[in-house]
Image: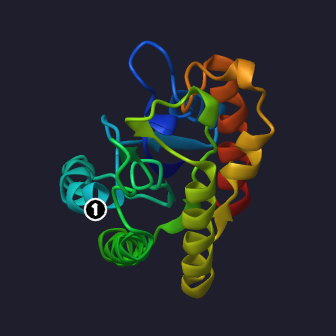
Amino acid sequence: MKNVFLIGDSIRFGAGNVSPGYGIYVKEMLKDVANVYAPSENCRFAEYTLRALFDWHLRLKKENIKIDLIHWNNGLWDVLRLHGDEPLTPCDVYVYYLRRIHAMLKKLFPEAKIIFALSTSIIEAKASADFCRFNADIEQYNEAAKALMEELGVPVNDLYSVSKGIDDSLHCDFVHYGKEGSEILARAVTKKILEEL
């Protein structure tokens, strides 16, 4: 059995009782092909992921788990605008941290194949003025991430396009997805993992 490691925000992890996240469905969909591991937390913004990789790797190392493939995402926390401010992470800084995360993944998991997933879209009309994301920002950050991943030779999973095809009724709030929406994303994640595994 191969070992897969999922790194991602609440679209992967879930959000309280409102969203299950796609991670649990990917684990089920891959049960005959791979063991699926993931941090037991929301991986949040890119700088957080870079810091937390030390802890996540240590846990896997203690269990003697060799990772064959990493499906990784950051972005929705980075584009978050609080109280009308600029995005939490400026786009050039976001790219800087993605480059560092990639380098750290290669260092900690030298034999693992890496896939980067684009951030999913949101329903702007349901966002709060004090806690907001914009699809224009998400698209800008996704394009910057795609350019970096092309430079690094990392396959990209276009979850943004997948999410744009998910009906608003399958959202449980302006960012997250309910069971059916999460399952749609999980199928896209599983398909890409199987292509690259």
Q: Quadrant of the C terminus?
A: bottom right
Position of residue 61 measured from the top left corner of the image (x, y, whole percent):
23, 55
Indicate whether 181 appears above or below 86.
above
**Residue picked out by circle 1:** 47
Position of residue 40 measured from the top left corner of the image (x, y, whole percent):
31, 34
Amino acid type at circle 1 is Glu
Residue at 21 percent across and 48 percent down: it is 59
- Decide: few, some or many residues near mark 1? Use Cα within 10 Å; few <14, some 14-19, many ≥20: some
Residue 123 makes an appearance in the image: no
Q: Is residue 197 left or right of residue 40?
A: right
Residue at 81 percent across and 38 percent down: it is 165
Position of residue 151 measured from the top left corner of the image (x, y, whole percent):
58, 87
Render colour scheme: rainbow
Residue ranking furthest to the top: 17
Q: Nearer the viewer, residue 55 or 17?
A: 17
Residue 22 makes an appearance in the image: yes
Position of residue 186 measured from the top left corner of the image (x, y, whole percent):
65, 36
Residue at 65 percent across and 65 percent down: it is 156
Q: Nearer the viewer, residue 63 or 39?
A: 39
Q: Is residue 77 left or right of residue 4?
A: left
